[in-house]
């Protein structure tokens, strides 16, 4: 089976799912159905999300799988985030005070945490 296309091949506008079919009992349901937030992602972005999940969200692990640099992977992740309707880092920056950011960077500088832990803390908070 092929994945559901997200845009019209003729005019490039978004497509709406209007028919569902059950191969077991030959039932067809017609109407307008939402495809969910991931329906708007390209096949390449869906593949990226699968690799992201398989690697438990660790971008440095994804470098080996994708044979790409960390910044390139981060940019692709930001593309997925934007495709889902969010702005990368906007919420995280709002939750973390300047003092908290400095503390994380000080801990990194003093060797209390490693760079991966610091990045994770900066992203999550």
Image (cartoon, rainbow, N blue to C red):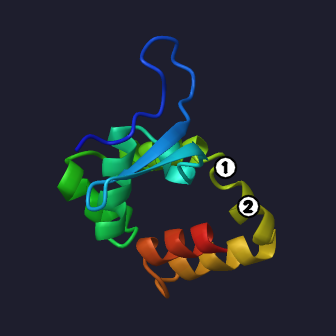
- Residue 20 vs residue 106, the one in the foreground: 20
Q: Which mark is residue 91?
A: 2
* Residue 105 rendering spot, x and y as whole percentages: 60, 72
* Residue 122 rendering spot, x and y as whole percentages: 61, 69
- Which of disc 2 and disc 1 is earlier in sequence? 1
What residue do we see at 39% from left, 44% from top? 45
Q: Dots 1 and 2: beta carbons under 8 Å?
A: yes
Between marks 1 and 2 in the image, the one whose residue lies nearer the viewer: 1
The answer to whether residue 9 is visible is: yes
69 lies above or below 64: above
Q: Looking at the rendering, in which quadrant would you find the C terminus?
A: bottom right
What residue do we see at 32% from left, 53% from top? 26
- Tell me if 1 is positioned left or right of 115 in this view: left
Q: Is the residue marked by circle 1 packed among few (<14), some (14-19), or many (20+) residues within 10 Å?
A: few
Pointer 1: what residue? 86
Q: Is the residue marked by circle 2 packed among few (<14), some (14-19), or many (20+) residues within 10 Å?
A: few
Label 2: element kind? helix
The answer to whether residue 70 is visible is: no
- Tell me if 55 is positioned left or right of 38 in this view: left
31 lies above or below 90: above
């Amino acid at each position: 089976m092929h994945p559901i296309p997200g845009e019209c091949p003729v005019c490039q506008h978004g497509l709406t799912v209007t028919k569902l079919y059950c191969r077991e009992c030959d039932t067809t349901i017609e109407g307008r159905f939402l495809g969910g937030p991931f329906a708007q992602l390209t096949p390449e972005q869906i593949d990226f999300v699968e690799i992201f999940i398989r690697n438990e969200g660790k971008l440095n692990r994804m470098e080996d799988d994708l044979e790409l640099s960390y910044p390139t992977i981060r940019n692709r992740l930001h593309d997925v985030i934007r495709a889902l309707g969010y702005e990368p880092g906007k919420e995280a920056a709002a939750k973390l005070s300047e003092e908290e950011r400095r503390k994380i960077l000080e801990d990194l500088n003093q060797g209390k945490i490693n760079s991966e832990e610091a990045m994770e803390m900066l992203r999550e908070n």
